[in-house]
Image (cartoon, helix red, strand yellow):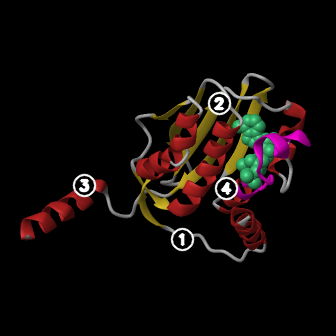
Amino acid sequence: MMAIINDILDLSKIEAGQFELDIADFDLCDTIEQASAAASFEARAKGLALEVRFSEEVPSQARGDSRRLHQILLNLVANAVKFTANGSVVVAVTSRPGVGNDALVRVQVSDTGIGIDPKSLERMFEPFTQADASTTRNYGGTGLGLAIARELVQRMGGTIGATSEPDRGSTFWFELPLEPASRHADERHAAAALAAHAH
Ligand SMILES: Nc1ncnc2c1ncn2[C@@H]1O[C@H](COP(=O)(O)OP(=O)(O)OP(=O)(O)O)[C@@H](O)[C@H]1O
Ligand SMILES: [Mg+2]
């Protein structure tokens, strides 16, 4: 109940523009690993493999709102685990150059679950929308996760989408422009080394 109320409040705040992004340097790989790991208990309980793959061009540090990135990805991974009975959930992260120095980071969550009729796929991003009347009965939930994810991705200047094949699985993805970290990893390492030296 608390989770539902929180989701509703969160979505209304975001929709009303009553929230600000909290932009800071962060560890992109850590954030993605942690958001995925938050669903690993559930995955293990169902006997599902949960894998995270990073392409080598993905920057390890970036600048953006890591808490919101975590929230978006967790919603997608939690869905993937919830709607999959057998097989695997794979989180794949790639990156390509964006505008200026931005990296366009793409996070893709693929599952081997129940899938969705491609005709109703776009509707799933609307608040309180689920595939059909049996969804709440069988899987719980309120149909807010994807609506929140879409709002957040759009506020962050990114795009979100999905492809799916009923009974075969789904792929939900989002792409976000992320600024490079303001301090380079080398500088940070140097600073850390200096600090360690001072002790
Ligand atoms: N990976 C997926 N596989 C199959 N169907 C999915 C998947 N992700 C989402 N859906 C469909 O889209 C609907 C909307 O997803 P959304 O995350 O918004 O709501 P929910 O998971 O049902 O509830 P909530 O996220 O509020 O707990 C789901 O009810 C389900 O029908
Ligand atoms: Mg959900």
Q: In which quarter of the image is the N terminus?
A: bottom right
- Say whether residue 141 is visible: yes
| Residue at mark 3 to residue at mark 2: CA–CA distance | 37 Å
Instruction: From the image, state whether disc 3 or disc 1 is nearer to you.
Output: 1
Q: Earlier in the sequence, mark 3 or mark 1?
A: 1
Q: Is mark 2 within 8 Å of ligand 1?
A: yes
- Say whether residue 162 is visible: no
Q: Give the amino acid type for the residue marked by disc 4 in the picture.
A: Val
Rendered image: mark on residue 153: 4
In the rendered structure, are the residues bearing label 4 and label 2 in contact, judged by CB atoms less than 8 Å apart? no
Q: Give the amino acid type for the residue marked by disc 1 in the picture.
A: Asp
Left or right for 4, reference 36: right
Q: Name the residue under label 3.
A: 186
User: Dot 3: what SS?
Assistant: helix
Which stretch did the figure color magenta? 131-148
Q: Is residue 107 above or below residue 11?
A: above
* Ligand 1 quadrant in view: top right
Q: Name the residue under label 2.
A: 111
Q: Is residue 164 above or below residue 5?
A: above
Left or right for 52, reference 13: left
Q: Where is residue 125 in the image (x, y as percent from the top left)?
A: 80, 49
Q: Mark 1 points at which residue?
A: 22
Q: Nearer the viewer, residue 173 or 51?
A: 51
Instruction: From the image, state whether disc 3 or disc 2 is nearer to you.
Output: 2
